[in-house]
Amino acid sequence: MGAGFASSDGGHPKVHNCLFKGNTALSGAGAYFQTANGARLKDCIFTQNATTAGCSGIELSFSRDIKISNCTFYKSSPSNDDTAVINCWKSSVSDPIIMENIIIAWSERGVPVNWTGGCVIDVSYSDFFGNPGGNWVGPLSDVSGKKGNISKDPQFKDKAAGDLSLLDSSPCKDTGNPGSPNDPDGTPADMGAFLK
Ligand SMILES: [Ca+2]
């Protein structure tokens, strides 16, 4: 679990501006949080992470007060069509996992986000697009088109070459949470990782 990064036993890491690429694990290939409290993940890219039995991007269990913002997930490979890029289980219902300003696009399999048994994920101002298992599906079907969420081609500059920054015409430009701090270039927050 957690080939790229793992946090457990009350860990509260703050991870910014990191690339998680090409990791393979049983589950949570990019990052794995177990009994983590207060973790913050921002401006990170997850790409080409693969699993044999679960979610490919981030797995969360028994964790609370987690915020994942401005992260981009591209070409994720969950183990099969029933699994997700990000999965959560047995975490605090009264203290949802917060995800905002994230992009999950063109996964190889599965759905963007799922959770089971005693967990809630609050997703806003995010773009899920081109995922084989569907985009705003399962427990997130009720926030499709709401809370700033969209399903449009994010228009990466050159995804084939690994450039996941946004074209000026991208629907993810300046459409993050208006309550988020401005981007480093002084414009309103984008969805996805802001690449300097
Ligand atoms: Ca911006």
Image (cartoon, rainbow, N blue to C red):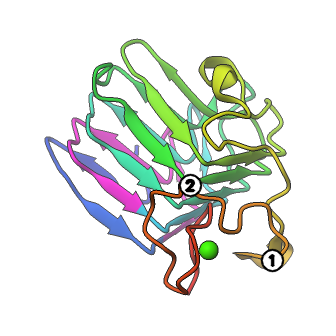
The image quadrant in which ligand 1 is located: bottom right
> Which span of residues is magenta-colored?
19-41
- Identified at 71% across, 30% down, the residue is 144
The kind of residue on which mark 1 rests is: Leu
Disc 1 or 2, which lies upstream in sequence? 2
Between 180 and 111, the one nearer to me in the picture: 180
User: What secondary structure is found at the residue carrying circle 1?
Assistant: loop
- Identified at 26% across, 39% down, the residue is 65
Residue 61: x %, y % from top left: 34, 30
Quick check: 169 above or below 148? below
Residue 129: x %, y % from top left: 79, 46
Residue closest to the far front: 178
- Identified at 17% across, 49% down, the residue is 11
Determine which residue is flagged by label 2. 101
- From the viewer's perspective, tell me whether residue 73 is left or right of residue 137: left
Determine which residue is flagged by label 1. 167
